[in-house]
Image (cartoon, rainbow, N blue to C red):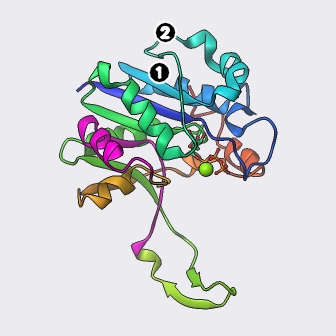
Amino acid sequence: KKISVVIVAAGSGSRFGDPLPKQYHQIGDKTLLRHCVKAFMHFCPPAHIQVVYNEDHQAWLDAAIGDLVGSGGLRPAVAGGLTRQQSVLNGLRALKDAAPDHVLIHDAARPGIDPDVIKRVLAALADCDGAIPGITVNDTIKQCDGHSMITRTIPRETLMRAQTPQGFHFKTILGAHEKFAGQEMTDDASLLEQLGIAIKCVAGSEGNDKITRRDDLSRIGEHFPNKQA
Ligand code: CTP
Ligand code: MG
């Protein structure tokens, strides 16, 4: 099967709250974005890798991965949009000419890619249109109203935390993104859920958690550099 990868890196990191966007911060010797690109180059060849970036970040992008463009399937980056969903759509459109069978869509803010997670997601695509890595929930989960008062407890056995890379049959996910363009879903599986398409949840990994706030950098950094390419 022909596989392509979209890495979305066009966000501005409002919750991270630093002038340097989180995808251009370093863990060890590499920026988060470079960790991601290198991981897919090593663990997922042969692939086209399409990075989606923010045009305001041009200099940071060039410094992070400029030297890798043209090697290992890495294409020149394309511009994203105001929402993650729009950024993914732009990335998928840019891959149309590559006509991949399957696509992996990944957040640049998840630098700790585990090769076994990639394998599980791709393996699940043999009999599913979509597959995502998920982590079981350990805490008791409360739903609260607008006044911080508990309204109910949600049985945690039914819950998974969604990670990326999320894998899909390329035509299916591109069609869904075109159909639902303008929504603001924070992951890609959500679009197929709206179409009633079955999606499998495979085991993710803790090291693959997303960098959202400043203190996530040191927490996720603990998993490095051992498993990294
Ligand atoms: N992303 C993107 N385009 C956007 C928004 C997000 O490509 N318009 C990317 C981010 O760069 C990140 C991934 O989607 O790699 C997950 O998004 P998130 O963690 O929410 O990052 P930000 O949107 O940058 O952060 P925040 O929501 O705190 O502003
Ligand atoms: Mg965001």
Gap between marks 1 and 2, in whole Å?
9 Å
Q: Point out which mark residue 71 bears.
A: 2
Check disc 1 and report the residue beneath it: 41
190 sits left or right of 64 in the view: left
- Residue situated furthest left in the rendering: 127
Q: Is residue 57 above or below residue 175?
A: above
Q: Give the residues in magenta.
A: 158-182
Which amino acid type is marked by label 1? Met
Q: Is residue 37 above or below residue 14?
A: above
128 sits left or right of 136 in the view: left
On the image, the x and y values in percent for residue 220 come to 67, 46
Crowding at mark 2 (Cα within 10 Å: few <14, some 14-19, many 20+): few
In contact (CB < 8 Å): disc 1 and disc 2? yes
Badge nearest the viewer, 1 or 2: 2
Crowding at mark 1 (Cα within 10 Å: few <14, some 14-19, many 20+): many
Q: Point out which mark residue 109 bears.
A: none
